[in-house]
Amino acid sequence: MSTLIQHGTVVTAASTTAADVLIENGVIKEVRAGIPADGHDVIDAKGMYVIPGGIDAHTHLDMPFGGTTSADDFETGTRAAAFGGTTSIVDFAIQARGTRMRDALDTWWKKAENKACVDYGLHMIVTDLGSSGLEDMDEMVDEGVASFKLFMAYPNVLMVDDATIFKALSRTAKNGALICMHAENGSVIDVIVAKALAEGKTAPIYHALTRPTRAEAEAVHRAIAMAEIAGTPVYIVHLSSEDALNEVREARDRGVPAFAETCPQYLLLSIEELERPNFEGAKYVFTPPLRTKENLPKLWDGLKHDHLQVVSTDHCPFCFEDQKVLGKDDFTKIPNGGPGIENRLQLIWHHGVNTGKVSLNRFVEITSTAPARIFGMYPRKGEIAPGSDADIVIWDPNALHTISAKTHHMRVDYSMFEGFQVKGNARTVLSHGEVIVDRGEFLGKAGRGRYLRRTARGGAWK
Ligand code: URP
Ligand code: ZN
Ligand code: ZN
């Protein structure tokens, strides 16, 4: 079975070329101009960009959190991802305290089995090293779980202490995995939160007002310092503020292998959203919170200059009507998280490429190639070259689209970007050479997505 994508402009992180792409048995066979059509299924990509499928390295599907479960499961979430041009995700399994990581891995494999529409990898959230946690980490690496998330926030739920963080970091110096850090000083934040509640401050806006950017910057600084002592890289997830970005930049300027991602919500939305009337601010309650407007251009600048390497979504949807309302009288009970898995490429293209904030090649790098490298999937993913999986998006730079909960495919009753108009959208999406989305129609199947066994020490820091 062979497919030829003809007459498009192939864009990778490194180059932009007029070329055809020949796919055989789900893998890219040849990339060059003038490949003859003979016998192949032909897809005409005239006037289109041909880019590697997007990789969202931070999603939470079917995740128990905040007294409820995130609204998208592996079927609805990965189908929505595909509509937006994302062909691989890396989700998070959670080790429950006092249990083995193997149990969590089995649980999350079951959640994804027969459901995932695109390929999926898993990070492991470590909540407890116990007596066997370090050996468990090695076992996870052998299973293709090449990264772990640790929390410096959410005391008594997910937060771990510095000793645990340092032990885990030190283990990755040996086994080559990467620690992803939720960097906020949870102990300090908890004191600020308790004071706010005691003063009767219960509305959604206090979620943001009780989590200062210094609490994020301090934790980023501490995480990087501990990684330096352990002699290993570290990856900061969902970085939200200039304050925190300065810590990453300062470390990278010293040659430290510190990496960081941000998300569309931090690039495009600001703290005022949490003041929406009728409790609608709860739609924008996630952690870290939205920041003041001055932060936004600094984050775009960070992406442009490689102080930030990746744009992920932190997709963690909770419906407004029956989930966000859990915190109607107390902002600390609002399930933390927001939806976005479908809109990442559209938003970064429109607000990044169309405005000249990021180049075409940088767009591909931050949405696909860099996460593939950092998380041990490159060059199988994130590349258009012979031997790579044929996960390809045919991108129409002129397509107009209005983002709305009325038309999106995520199983959630609101959009954080309701009414945003974008120019540029995925026209045709291929996964392993199979067309799974074409002109707004889903042609894939639940369960076709494969587990991504990722390689430790992806090599990005060499
Ligand atoms: O509010 C958020 N970000 N929810 C998902 C969990 C996390 O911290 O990433
Ligand atoms: Zn987090
Ligand atoms: Zn997250």
Image (cartoon, rainbow, N blue to C red):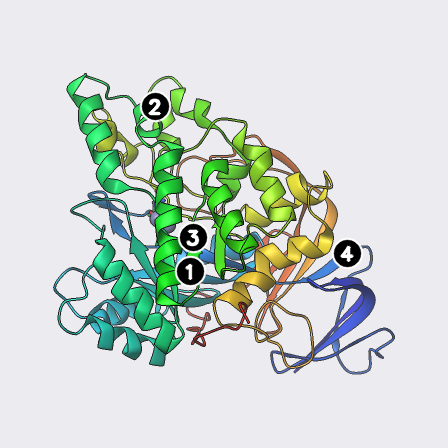
Report the Cα–Cα distance between label 4 and label 3: 34 Å
Report the Cα–Cα distance between label 3 and label 2: 25 Å
Q: Which residue is mark 3?
A: 236
Q: Provide the secondary structure element on which disc 4 rests.
A: loop
Q: Are marks 4 and 1 in contact (CB under 8 Å)?
A: no
Q: Provide the secondary structure element on which disc 1 rests.
A: strand
**Counting other residues with Cα less than 10 Å from the Cα at mark 2, is it few (<14), some (14-19), or many (20 or more)?**
many
The amino acid sitting under disc 4 is: Met
Which of discs 4 and 2 lies nearer the camera? The answer is: 2
The amino acid sitting under disc 2 is: Ile
Q: Could one spot residue 407 in this view of the protein?
A: no
The amino acid sitting under disc 1 is: Val
Tell which circle, 4 or 2, labels the residue nearer the N-terminal end.
4
Report the Cα–Cα distance between label 4 and label 1: 37 Å
Q: What residue sits 28% from the left and 79% below the top?
A: 139
Distance from mark 2 CB to nearest ligand 1 atom below 8 Å: no
Q: Which residue is mark 1?
A: 234
